[in-house]
Amino acid sequence: MAPLVPVFAAESLPDHVNTVRRNFQEKRRKGQTVNLQECPLLEMTQFSCNPPQNGVPEPGVVVCEPVVRLFRRCAGGLTVETTSWEPLRLAEEAKQKQAVNTNQ
């Protein structure tokens, strides 16, 4: 049986990247703190065929839709899926940029 996978909000992803779980205990990852924004952004496209929200297709018809997934590859081989985190990061950057512009 596969080990339990913790569920957490996308906003806390940078904190979770810097911890490792072993034997139900969290420990800080060895080495320097990982800053996801400094890691290169990668993109992968997968396809979901006959997605359930589109209903049942006619017999013999296969309909596939692209699903884009985003990743950050950091030093030491750490690769993290950031698909849910990237829009939050962009919104935060836009909010900070707007705050700087209104203070000028």
Image (cartoon, rainbow, N blue to C red):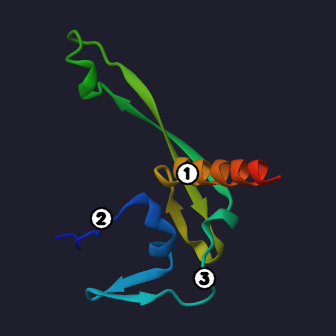
Helix, strand or loop at disc 1?
helix
Location of residue 86 with respect to 22 vertically, above or below: above
Q: Are marks 1 and 2 in contact (CB under 8 Å)?
A: no
Amino acid type assigned to the residue bearing label 2 in the image: Val
Q: Which residue occupies the foreground of this view, 3 or 12?
A: 12
Q: CA distance from mark 3 to mark 1?
A: 19 Å
Helix, strand or loop at disc 2?
loop
**Which residue corresponds to the image point at 29% horizontal and 13% vertical from the top-left?**
61
- Residue bearing mark 3: 33
Amino acid type assigned to the residue bearing label 3 in the image: Thr
- Residue bearing mark 1: 86
Location of residue 21 with respect to 92 vertically, above or below: below
Location of residue 19 with respect to 85 vertically, above or below: below
Query: Of the residues under marks 2 and 3, which one precedes in the sequence?
Result: 2
Q: CA distance from mark 1 to mark 2?
A: 18 Å
- Residue bearing mark 2: 7
Query: Of the residues under marks 3 and 1, which one precedes in the sequence?
Result: 3
Helix, strand or loop at disc 3?
loop
**Which residue corresponds to the image point at 77% horizontal and 54% vertical from the top-left?**
103
Amino acid type assigned to the residue bearing label 1 in the image: Glu
Location of residue 67 with respect to 22 vertically, above or below: above
Q: Is residue 2 left or right of residue 40?
A: left
